[in-house]
Amino acid sequence: MSNGNGIAIDVKGLTKSFGGREVVHDLSMQVKRGSIYGFLGPNGSGKTTTIRILCGLLTPDSGEGTCLGYDIRRDAEKIKRQVGYMTQRFSLYQDLSVRENLEFVARLYGLADARGAARDMIKRLGLSGREEQLAGELSGGWKQRLALGACTLPNPQLLLLDEPTAGVDPKARRDFWNEIHALAAEGLTVLVSTHYMDEAERCHEIAYIAYGYLLAHGTVEEVIAKSALTTYTVTGDDLNELGAALTGKPGIDMVAPFGTSLHVSGRDVPALEASIAPWRERGGLHWQKSKPSLEDVFIELMGRSKDNFQ
Amino acid sequence: MSAVEHPEPRREIRERFGFLRRSYAMLVKEFIQLRRDRVSFAMIVMLPVMQLMLFGYAINTTPRHLPSAVLLQEDSDLARSVLKALENTKYFRFLYEVHDVDDFDNLLKSGKVLFGVEIPRGFERAVRRGDRPALLVAADATDPVAASAALGSLGMIVQTALAHDLYIGEPPEMPFEIRAHARYNPAANSSLNIVPGLVGTILTMTMLIFTALSVTREVERGTMESLLSMPIKPIEVMFGKIVPYVLVGFVQAFLIISIGVGLFGVPVLGNLVLLALLSTLFITTNLAVGYTISTLVQNQLQAMQMSMMFFLPSILLSGFMFPFAGMPAWAQYLGECLPLTHYLRIVRAIMLKGATMENLRFDTLALAALMLLAMTVAVTRFRRTLD
C-alpha cells in the first residue's frame, strides 16, 4: 500500500454485484488526504454502492484496499469511527428535534460532553433558536446542513457525502460547498457524489463512473484534456434544425443545445471539420471553436459508455 | 487527539464503557420517539383497559340466560316447577312455549333458542308412579362452551326441583349423581381466570408488535443506513430498543392487575415481588421474539403479519382460550414452545393459588431459555451491512 499519511482512500479492483448484475466493475481509485474528491456519473452508475463499500456498509465481492489506513474488509468497525457518512436520503430521525439528533450522534460516538458538543454544533450550523424543532419539519436546505453537522460532529477524518445537495436551492448549495471547503481546509478528506457540473468544478479532483466503470479521473483540466474533444459553439437561427441535421454525421460524437447556443463536439477533428463544412458557409450562423466544458466531456463519455456497456 | 483546534475545539472521545454508553444513546432516542408517537402511547394504556373491559364484562365463558324454549305436552304443576327451577339457575331463559314438535325443532334450527326442554305427555303421572320418565333437553351444541356448562348443571337442577316439589315425599333416586367441585374458582367466575390470562395476552401482543416494528421502521425510514455506518454493535441496538419497552410492559401489567383486583375482585394470593420479577422475564422474552421478527422481515407490514402468526397460536395453544390439558399431545408440545403458555401458568398460579418460586421452577426456566434463544437469533440475524 502507498504511504498511509498522504492517501486517505486507496482501493484496487473493487467489484460488487447484486443479483447477478455487476454494479461496480474493477474500480480502483486513490484520494489524497485533505482533498475534495468529486464522484460523478449518471443515476445507477454505482456511485452509492462504491461509497457504501468504502464505509463498510457493503462488502465487495472482490478487490481490496484501505480507507484511512484501515483494511476495508477487516477493519470496518475502525473505519466507521473515523468516517462521517451522509446518506443520499435524509437519514436523521425526523421525529427527533435538532438537538436530540445531534446529542444522539454525540453519545453514540462517545463524545465527552454530548450536550455541549450538540450545542456548539447548533451554533456552528446557525440553527440557534431552532434546536427544539423536529428535524422532519426543517426545510430541505436546513436538513442537509443538519445532516452534515451530524456527520462532522464526531470529528471524522473522512466525509463521504452521497449527493448531498440534491433538491437544495442554489443559495443553500453555495453555503453547503463553502462549508465543505472550510472542512477540507481543516484537514478533512471529502468524497462527494453529485450530478451538478458547477459542483464538480469546485472539487480538487474528480472521477467519472458510468455503468460501474470508472471512465475518467484527475483534476477538471486533466479530464477535459484527456477527453481530446474538440467543440464548436454555434449561435444563430434554426439551431434545432441544425442539431437534427448534424446528429450522427461522421466525426460528430455529440450535439447538445446550451441555452441559445449549440455545442457540436467530436474527437476526430478532420472528420468533424468535414461534416460541419457545408453548414459553416451558410449565413445566419456563428461558429466558434472553443474548449469543451466538463459537461460536454461527461455527456460524451456517457454516450460512449452507453454504446459500450448497454 | 489534538486538544484545541480552531475554529472548532476537538472533543475528546471516550472509549471506556462503550457498550453501556451506546446502548444508553439508543435508549434515550427510543424513549423520545415513543413519547412523540402519541398514537402508540395511547395504545399502551387503552389496549389493556379496553381488552379487560371486553373480556371481563362482555365475554363470559359461563353463559347466563341462554335463550330456551319449552315443548310442553302436558300442563301440570310438576312440569311448571321443573321449568321454574331451570329458570332459577339463570342458565336458561324461556322465551317460547310451544306445543308442537315441529315448532320446537324450527326454533332450535333457526338459532332462536339454544336450548329446548321437552316435557312429555303424562310426565307428572309417570313421576308419581316412580317410572322415571325422560326429560328431553335438546341443546344447540354448535357452541360447545355455551352448551356444556348449562348441560352439566341439568342433573342437579332437576333433582332439586323434584325434591322441592310438594307432590313427592322422597325424591326418586337419580340414576347417577353429579358432584362438581370447582376449585379456586367455585363460582365458575370466568373473570378470575381471564384477568391473569389477559395480563399475558396483552403483554404478548403489545410487546411483540412494538419491537417487531422497531427495526423495520428504521429500515423503511432510511435511518438504518446511517445507524449502520456508525460504530454501534447489534447487541447495543437491541438493548437500546428493548429496555424502554420493558418499562412499558411493566406499566401495562400493573394497569391490568390493578383493574382486575379493583373491578373484578381478582385476588393476588402470591408474592407481588415474585410476580413482578417473572413478569419482567416474560416481557423481555416477548420483546426478544418481536425483535427477532423485525430482523427477519423486509417491511412493517410483513412485521405485523408475522407478529400475528406468532400471536394467534399463542392465544389458541397456550391455554388462554381452551384448556391446555384438553389439547392433543402435539398441540401441547407446540404450546410448550410458546412463552405465553408458561407465563399463564405462572401468573395464574401466583395470583389465584399463591404459588411460590418452588412451584414455578420449570416454567421460569422454560421462559428464560426461550428468551435466550430469541435474543441469540436476533443478534446473529441483525445485519451489520446492507448486503
Image (cartoon, rainbow, N blue to C red):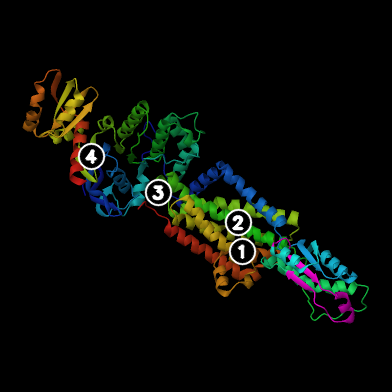
First to last magenta residue range? B110-138
Residue A102 placement, left or right of B185 = left
Q: Using the image, name the chain to which the residue with label 3 belongs.
A: B
Q: Are marks 4 and 2 on the same chain?
A: no
Viewer-nearest residue: B341 or A144 = B341
Q: CA distance from mark 2 to mark 3?
A: 30 Å
Residue B74 placement, left or right of A134 = right
Q: Are marks 4 and 3 on the same chain?
A: no
Q: Is residue A211 visible?
A: yes
Label 4's element?
strand
Q: Amino acid at mark 3?
A: Leu
Residue B174 lies in what quarter of the image? bottom right
Q: CA distance from mark 1 to mark 2?
A: 10 Å
Q: Using the image, name the chain to which the residue with label 2 belongs.
A: B
Q: Is residue A176 above or below residue B352?
A: above
> Residue at position x 47%, y 42% from top?
A104
Alpha-carbon neighbours of circle 1 within 10 Å: few (<14), some, or many (≥20)? many
Q: Amino acid at mark 2?
A: Leu
Q: CA distance from mark 4 to mark 1?
A: 61 Å
Q: CA distance from mark 4 to mark 3?
A: 27 Å
Q: Amino acid at mark 4?
A: Tyr
> Residue at position x 12%, y 18% from top?
A283
Residue A230 lies in what quarter of the image? top left
Q: Using the image, name the chain to which the residue with label 1 belongs.
A: B
Report which residue position mark 2 lands on: B203
For marks 3 and 1, the one nearer the N-term is 3
Q: Using the image, name the chain to which the residue with label 4 belongs.
A: A
Report which residue position mark 3 lands on: B228
Q: Is residue A253 above or below residue B170?
A: above
